Image (tube, grey):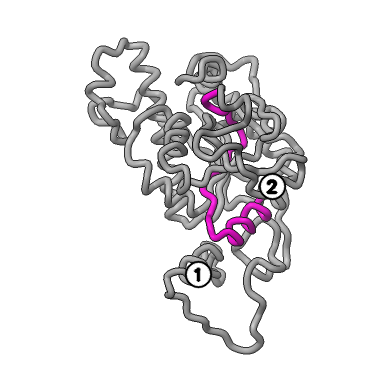
Amino acid sequence: LDLRGELALPHPLDILQEIRSGELKFEHTGELQRPGYVGIREGTFRDRYPSTTFSGTSTFDEIFVITNDKCTEQFQEFSNRARAIDMKFTKIVATPAREINLEMPPITIRNASTLVKGMSHAHQAIFKRQVGYTFTHYQIWLSAFSHKRQRILVVDDTLFPRGPLVRSFPQLFNWVDQESIAGQQPWHFMFFRRTILEQDWAATNETFWSGTESAWSPNPQYKHRVVRAKPSYGAGFYAMSHQGLGWMLDHFKEYRAPLDMQISMLQREYPDEFIALSACNNDQPRVFCPEIVQEIQVTSTKGYDCVWRRMQEVKISKTGQA
């Protein structure tokens, strides 16, 4: 049974795995129903023969919104906008820097003693924020995977999807998932906000392992396609599949760099295995995809804790380094 107490159907990608391993056993009674994703509700594989249709943000099993405990006005503004489009979400308070003990970190830090040695107090404070932010995402992945979420959205509360993107979610993921099944290759991660690293390659939209970013599926709201993303920086607004959650938990064993950079490192290290997609305007890339995701700016917000993520993005967009 699933979390709602209803009969849980196997995910089609799990069926494919069973077929490939030779473990699948067919059992049916009465009239044999047609298999696959024919006739399903747009945006989900949980119900093969549903009577309702998803719309907008209900495409996701769960939406996680990351906030800072010192930034209440920022979170309130996000909540007001979410309420206006009937977006249901789970509030996640990021692990604050003040709770990070670098001698006993919540997540293993590679070469911790070398990294911390000689750091100024200011640099240590920034480093603790980065470790806390990474640990927060790791906890989200762990929770979503253990609760068998099939598709999640993770968002900083300083960002918000534009209307056309929200309306496109059901059909966009319907196409993305169908391509996964047709190609027998599950997608893992999808950028909705990114800047392409290695700007010399970005100029010609090329990547060092496979030429141009290859098309993955159509994008119903925009003319450009969803593509296999080249190494990109952007963990402020992304989606993950259940397969992606499992893959990330298997491969994300320690902190090696700020989260956004470490995701791009995984893209480089596993170019054929880690399926990271982009739903931005990939034909004419713009820094952090303002065409689909907007920044929420609260004029009364004060303090570095409320703006450090956006300031880090500005630095990356100018220098290409974290």
180 part of magenta stretch: yes
Q: In front: mark 2 or mark 1? A: 2
Look at the image and give the residue range highlighted in magenta: 173-199
Taking the image as shown, residue 44 lies to the left or right of residue 131, namely right
Residue at numbered disc 2: 169
Residue at numbered disc 1: 1
Other residues around mark 1 within 10 Å, as few (<14) / some (14–19) / many (≥20): few
205 part of magenta stretch: no
- Residue under the point 67% across and 32% down: 293
Q: Nearer the viewer, residue 154 or 23?
A: 23
- In space, the residues marked 2 and 1 are separated at their CA atoms by 26 Å
Amino acid bearing label 2: Phe
Badge 2 marks a residue whose secondary structure is helix
Amino acid bearing label 1: Leu
Rendered image quadrant of residue 268 = top left
Residue 302 appears at what percent x and percent y?
55, 14
Other residues around mark 2 within 10 Å, as few (<14) / some (14–19) / many (≥20): many
